[in-house]
């Protein structure tokens, strides 16, 4: 059998990242411009955590879209600074100093989320679309199909994803980076499936679904036209929530050196390598930590605000 | 009782399915155990055949599967292989001998953190539900959310930096391959326990808070208020029993994530538990060992969820009545 | 005992800081041993007044006026929805014991038994050990009353005490309350939207509209000849159990708090409104034998109800169900017969009523006809359709089209995500897949017109419409297929009486113009009497009596039917 995917191509991740960022930027502008979504944003804004979340996300998008233009240095260039061979302290030239190879740390911090955002975005979309699809269809299937599948899901959900990811990586040496997408995506989709199914069950019990069945519509029609639109809110919140957990998951995997190749900038790798320097060079430790956490908090809080704005019980969507 | 039984059956089914999954993953990799092992040596067909005979890899797939499964049942997880041919070599220990101390260390770590974190988080959750949307609730919730969103290795590093390197209260990392006595354990354990507890608390506090708010806003809480029952009794005797079960079972579900957290924390502190063992076996290409650790982690998860179900059955008389 | 003056209750909006009144300037007084009824449509502020009296206004504030009571009164309130109002994790005995403990009662066990017997709960000893979900709805309601009585109240407020109960349980509960009041002498305030139970239980009645009292006085006088236009309209909207007459609807919807009109709140819907009404608020002032808040109280007593037409001539057989049975497997393998050997038949253009208590199998029968439920024996024949005995997904489109269903609760029967236009378009597009855009929009408009809605409704979504409007949309959705048979499952029981009247009126008009047959399921005999031609009485899955509605209701043969009619009469206006 073949390995899941080729080792991560940072190039590819970079492209996806730009796509994601541009899409987010356009969405952001669109959300503000288009009226109904502006109303939704307004409702998220009303909750304090939604407000904090939106601010953090907007800051991240702005930094990642415009940051590389404003920063004079490239994250890969190693500077020759005479006596000081590494760890150049923060100053005018290098606002955050330089790292162990004398690379501009600010440039690295600004572009350090690329692989994480690209890979986790793909994973979240995969997990959500597959989980939501299966969750909705299960509720319309005969009872025994649902029973059997849920038993299997309950069993599979008990595999700790990190352990399984590690196992897969021992077995398929070289399966790095993008194999995160199918493996972790699959395990996260199980949790999504449970949440969406729980919600869809309440919807399928409602009379408008019965009415559609009595009219003679096919199951697939009912799933897409009657059930899916009413699960949209749950799915949206799930997407945001899963994305935050996936960012953390990616960070952990990357911390173990499983995700990106060494010279590429990545927040977790930066944290991992400056870990021992935590007290002596705090400026190499805190910026990536802050960047990663603010992104996670931003998405998490926005999802929270979104859930409150649309009046959803968020407990079920908590991490599983 | 029938309910308990059906939970037990589905737990056993889950265990079986996971075992099968791990076995399939192990056997589906390119080549087999012996080709990986012998990769570094001269490719010698005879050696390969010998090796396969020793490990039963020449048998049909299904026989291998049943051997493996029955081995699991009696705690025989295969062998940790350094030298694939000489099965009697000193370094080829049984996997179970390697796992036992690691499992012990991880369980100790996990249980102590759970005993600290769960009650504390529940109390904090109830407290913030009672003071919901006031500054104290905000303070508790946001602090804990911070710990939830900062990656665990960063938290571990920060604690290490402050308490071990700066204040020098504990050693930063553990040296050695296993914990031999309890004073050694208490030397190294405080920081990992603190880390793991913080990781757990955020989730449980959130769940407890929202279940408790639901219960406090319910019609039955209002009836109790209308009938002149004092506030503390409403909270403890009327609301808590219905708020606890969902919290317990949902927290048990988050354990899967926490088990991954254990791996990280153990590796940061070099704590000789299952997580570190898993990572080491990954770097050493110790397939059977890695598979066994994954399996044990999954079984732990299944067991925890089973226990959580049983506990909620005891807390909530509705579920007991149906049993 | 209780004296309320100029009480206004409301809340302050978060962002704008605007004060919104839910109750406005309510005056009320009750003496010990008296019973006051409080009627009004949903959202009129009845429950809010109850909570204000009990001193538990969560999230609301008293904006004006006062509630005067004698010192430290003992006020008990029995909440709406008994099912959710008892702590689910605590046994009945413990809940009673706890309340008694904090009411400082000495012999708690004895007193608990006394209370349980007082509310006529059977076998108190075993009930004490049970959890709330192991009781029936009526028993839960009685436990809740026992809890309230445990503190020996001087004022007892009951919020919708009978909503979840069927007719005979209702009757016994009301008798029980009267007996308890006699022995303990407390004052009672019964809040309900049901004029029937108010008439049975209360000597005095206050009619509420949009947070204010519009009429206050002797119950009989209010019901027989209220002077406020709203009171009169409300009474006329009730279906008649004695006569075959259609009730009268009140057009329009009640205003929401914060959107109440200046002047008389009823003015937009009032047939007698004049300019003055739109500027000044009429005070509650004595007028003849009651107190009325109206500038132009009504004097004459006229009745405007219309009779229901009989189905026309030339009827043909449409549907026959012969000896059908449906079984469910229960936990533990027992077999439960939801329908047992049931036969019905129906001609074109007729309305068949199916009546029975909850659990008698009414909805199961409809689900069988709709092809949503498998049956174990018997046959179903729809003229001209040979695939009618199959489940719905195996029927031909033409057969599916001939039978349409409308559900009890309009707010769950319409997809909240679709616009009204889309809701109506879906069935039309399903049955007329080749239709052009303009054909579809013509059909939609035609249907809207038929149920008396306008084009403005097309772009709205269900949550923007009121219950009555929603039920009309649901009807239109069924009618757009031009079915031969319309299945109506309790379609008026989730609606207020005034809206119910409008829907019943609409059904009769639709049948006259479209000519489809209808099967109407209901537990309300008066509704049946006003519109159904034939009637089937179901009990525990078996037919008790079947025949022409008039005949059965005026000369019931079976004891069960007689008792149904008797308890319905006992508590209707
Ligand atoms: N805490 C609150 N905040 C805002 N609005 C409220 C609050 N409580 C009640 N209302 C509003 O006040 C109005 C009256 O409510 P109330 O529950 O008293 O009506 P009701 O007559 O008892 O209706 P029903 O027959 O449906 O029980 C409703 O429109 C309701 O939405
Ligand atoms: S005051 Fe005028 S509008 Fe109000 S009820 Fe009387 S007649 Fe109608
Ligand atoms: Mg009410």
Image: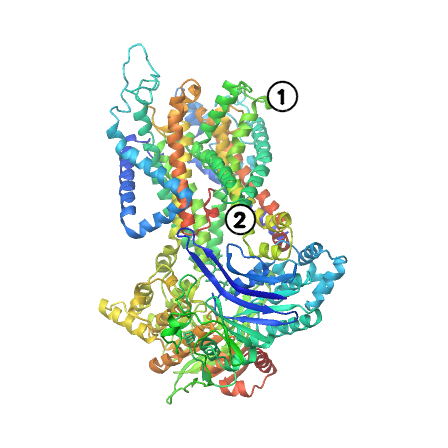
Image-based side of C241 in relation to C268, left or right: right
Query: In front: mark 1 or mark 2?
Result: 2
The numbered mark, 1 or 2, whose residue comes first in the sequence reads 1
Instruction: State which quarter of the image contains the C terminus of chain C.
Output: bottom right
Residue found at x 61% / y 67%: C138
User: Disc 1: which chain?
Assistant: B
Q: Position of residue C374 (x, y in %)?
A: 47, 68
In depth, the one of C311 and C392 nearer the eye is C311
Label 1 residue SS: helix
Colouring used for the render: rainbow
- The image quadrant that residue A7 belongs to is top left
In depth, the one of A5 and C125 nearer the eye is C125
Q: Is disc 1's CB within 8 Å of ligand 1? A: no
Residue found at x 73% / y 63%: C113
Judging by the rendered image, the residue that carries numbered circle 2 is B213
Q: Is residue B273 above or below residue C86?
A: above
Residues packed near mark 2 inside 10 Å, few (<14), some (14 to 19) or many (20 plus): many
- The image quadrant that residue C163 belongs to is bottom right
- Say whether residue C387 is visible: no
Q: Position of residue C570 (x, y in %)?
A: 59, 79
In depth, the one of B245 and C404 nearer the eye is B245
Q: Is residue C42 above or below residue C506?
A: above
In depth, the one of B144 and C361 nearer the eye is B144
Q: Position of residue C101 (x, y in %)?
A: 71, 54
Image disc number at residue B183:
1
Q: Is residue B234 above or below residue C116?
A: above
Residue furthest to the bottom:
C313
Q: Position of residue A174 (x, y in %)?
A: 36, 29
- Say whether residue C267 is visible: yes
């Amino acid at each position: 059998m073949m390995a899941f995917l080729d080792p991560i191509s940072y190039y590819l991740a970079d492209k996806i990242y730009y796509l994601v960022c541009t899409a987010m930027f356009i969405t952001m502008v669109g959300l503000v411009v288009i009226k109904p979504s502006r109303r939704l944003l307004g409702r998220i804004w009303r909750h304090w955590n939604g407000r904090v979340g939106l601010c953090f996300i907007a800051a991240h998008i702005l930094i990642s879209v415009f940051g590389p233009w404003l920063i004079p240095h490239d994250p890969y260039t190693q500077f020759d600074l005479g006596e000081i061979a590494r760890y150049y302290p923060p100053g005018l030239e290098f606002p955050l100093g330089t790292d162990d190879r004398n690379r501009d740390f600010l440039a690295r911090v600004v572009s350090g989320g690329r692989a994480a955002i690209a890979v986790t975005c793909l994973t979240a979309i995969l997990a959500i679309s597959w989980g939501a699809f299966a969750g909705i269809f299960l509720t319309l299937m005969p009872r025994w199909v649902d029973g059997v599948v849920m038993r299997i899901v309950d069993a599979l959900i008990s595999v700790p994803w990190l352990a399984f990811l590690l196992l897969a990586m021992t077995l398929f040496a070289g399966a790095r980076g993008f194999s995160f997408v199918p493996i972790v995506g699959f395990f996260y989709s199980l949790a999504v499936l449970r949440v969406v199914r729980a919600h869809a069950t309440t919807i399928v019990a409602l009379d408008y679904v019965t009415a559609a069945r009595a009219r003679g519509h096919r199951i697939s029609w009912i799933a897409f036209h009657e059930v899916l639109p009413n699960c949209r809110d749950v799915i949206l919140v799930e997407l945001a929530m899963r994305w935050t957990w996936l960012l953390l998951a990616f960070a952990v995997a990357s911390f173990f050196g499983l995700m990106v190749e060494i010279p590429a900038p990545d927040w977790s790798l930066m944290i991992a390598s400056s870990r021992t320097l935590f007290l002596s060079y705090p400026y190499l430790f805190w910026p990536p930590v802050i960047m990663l956490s603010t992104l996670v908090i931003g998405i998490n809080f926005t999802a929270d605000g979104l859930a409150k704005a649309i009046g959803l019980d968020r407990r079920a969507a908590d991490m599983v | 009782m029938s309910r308990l039984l059906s939970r037990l059956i589905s737990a056993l089914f889950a265990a079986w399915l996971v075992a099968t999954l791990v076995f399939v993953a192990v056997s589906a990799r390119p080549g087999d155990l012996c080709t990986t092992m012998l990769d570094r040596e001269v490719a010698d067909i005879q050696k390969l055949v010998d090796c396969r005979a020793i490990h039963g890899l020449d048998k049909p797939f299904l026989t291998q599967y049943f051997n493996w499964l029955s081995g699991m049942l009696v705690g025989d997880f295969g062998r940790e292989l350094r030298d694939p041919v000489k099965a009697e070599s000193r370094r080829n220990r049984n996997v179970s001998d390697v796992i036992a101390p690691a499992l012990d260390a991880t369980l100790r770590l996990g249980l102590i953190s759970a005993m600290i974190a769960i009650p504390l988080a529940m109390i904090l959750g109830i407290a913030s539900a009672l003071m919901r949307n006031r500054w104290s609730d905000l303070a508790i919730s946001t602090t804990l959310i911070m710990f939830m969103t900062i990656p665990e290795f960063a938290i571990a590093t920060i604690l290490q930096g402050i308490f071990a390197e700066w204040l020098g209260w504990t050693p930063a990392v553990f040296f050695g391959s296993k914990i031999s006595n309890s004073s050694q354990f208490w030397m190294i354990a405080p920081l990992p326990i603190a880390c793991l507890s913080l990781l757990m608390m955020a989730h449980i506090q959130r769940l407890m808070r929202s279940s408790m708010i639901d219960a406090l806003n319910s019609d039955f809480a209002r009836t109790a208020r209308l009938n002149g029952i004092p506030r503390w009794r409403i909270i403890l005797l009327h609301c808590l029993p219905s708020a606890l079960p969902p919290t317990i079972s949902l927290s048990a579900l988050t354990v899967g994530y926490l088990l991954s957290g254990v791996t990280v924390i153990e590796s940061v502190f070099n704590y000789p538990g299952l997580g570190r063992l898993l990572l080491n076996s990954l770097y050493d290409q110790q397939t059977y060992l890695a598979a066994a650790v994954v399996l044990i982690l999954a079984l732990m998860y299944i067991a925890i969820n089973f226990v959580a179900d049983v506990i909620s059955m005891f807390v909530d008389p509705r579920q007991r009545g149906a049993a | 005992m209780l004296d309320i003056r100029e009480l206004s209750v409301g809340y302050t909006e978060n962002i704008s800081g605007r004060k919104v009144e839910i109750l406005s300037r309510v005056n009320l007084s009750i003496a010990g041993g008296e019973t006051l009824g409080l009627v009004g449509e949903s959202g009129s502020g009845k429950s809010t007044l109850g909570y204000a009296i009990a001193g538990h206004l969560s999230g609301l504030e008293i904006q004006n006026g006062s509630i005067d009571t004698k010192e430290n009164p003992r006020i008990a309130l029995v909440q709406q929805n008994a099912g959710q109002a008892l702590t689910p994790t605590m046994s009945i005995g413990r809940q009673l014991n706890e309340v008694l403990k904090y009411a400082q009662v000495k012999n708690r066990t004895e007193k608990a038994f006394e209370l349980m017997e007082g509310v006529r709960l059977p076998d108190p000893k075993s009930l004490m050990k049970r959890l709330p979900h192991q009781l029936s709805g009526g028993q839960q309601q009685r436990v809740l009353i026992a809890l309230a009585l445990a503190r020996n109240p001087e004022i007892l407020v009951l919020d919708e005490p009978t909503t979840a109960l069927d007719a005979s349980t209702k009757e016994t509960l009301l008798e029980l309350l009267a007996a308890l009041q006699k022995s303990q002498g407390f004052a009672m305030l019964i809040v309900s939207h049901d004029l029937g139970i108010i008439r049975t239980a209360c000597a005095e009645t206050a009619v509420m509209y949009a947070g204010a009292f519009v009429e206050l006085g002797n119950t009989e006088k209010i019901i027989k000849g209220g002077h406020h236009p709203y009171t009169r309209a409300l009474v006329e909207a009730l279906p008649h159990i004695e006569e075959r007459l259609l009730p009268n609807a009140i057009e329009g919807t009640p205003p929401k708090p914060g959107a109440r009109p200046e002047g008389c709140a009823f003015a937009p819907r009032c047939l007698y409104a004049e300019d003055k009404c739109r500027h000044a608020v009429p005070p509650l002032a004595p007028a003849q034998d009651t107190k009325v808040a109206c500038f132009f109280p009504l004097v004459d007593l006229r009745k405007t109800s219309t009779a229901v037409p009989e189905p026309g001539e030339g009827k043909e057989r449409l549907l026959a169900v012969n000896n059908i049975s449906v079984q469910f497997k229960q936990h533990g393998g027992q077999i439960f017969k939801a329908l047992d050997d049931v036969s019905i038949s129906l001609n074109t253009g007729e309305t068949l009523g199916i009546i029975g208590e909850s659990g008698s199998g009414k909805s199961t029968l409809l689900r069988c006809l709709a092809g949503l439920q498998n049956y174990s024996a018997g046959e179903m024949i729809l003229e001209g359709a040979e695939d009618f005995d199959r489940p719905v997904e195996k029927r031909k489109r033409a057969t599916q089209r001939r039978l349409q269903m409308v559900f009890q609760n309009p707010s769950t029967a319409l997809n909240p995500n679709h616009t009204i236009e889309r809701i109506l378009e879906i069935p039309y597009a399903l049955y007329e897949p080749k239709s052009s855009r303009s054909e579809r929009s013509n059909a939609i408009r035609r249907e809207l017109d038929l149920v008396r809605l306008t084009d403005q409704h097309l772009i709205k979504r269900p949550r923007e419409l009121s219950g009555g409007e929603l039920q009309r949309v649901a009807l239109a959705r069924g009618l757009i297929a031009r079915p031969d048979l319309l299945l109506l499952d309790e379609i008026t029981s989730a609606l207020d009486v005034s809206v119910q009247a409008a829907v019943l009126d609409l059904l009769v008009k639709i049948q006259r113009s479209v000519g489809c047959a209808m099967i109407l399921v209901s537990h309300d005999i008066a509704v049946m009497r006003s519109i159904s031609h034939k009637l089937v009485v179901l009990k525990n899955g078996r037919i008790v009596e079947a025949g022409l509605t008039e005949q059965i209701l005026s000369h019931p043969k079976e004891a069960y039917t007689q008792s149904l009619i008797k308890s319905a009469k006992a508590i209707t206006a």
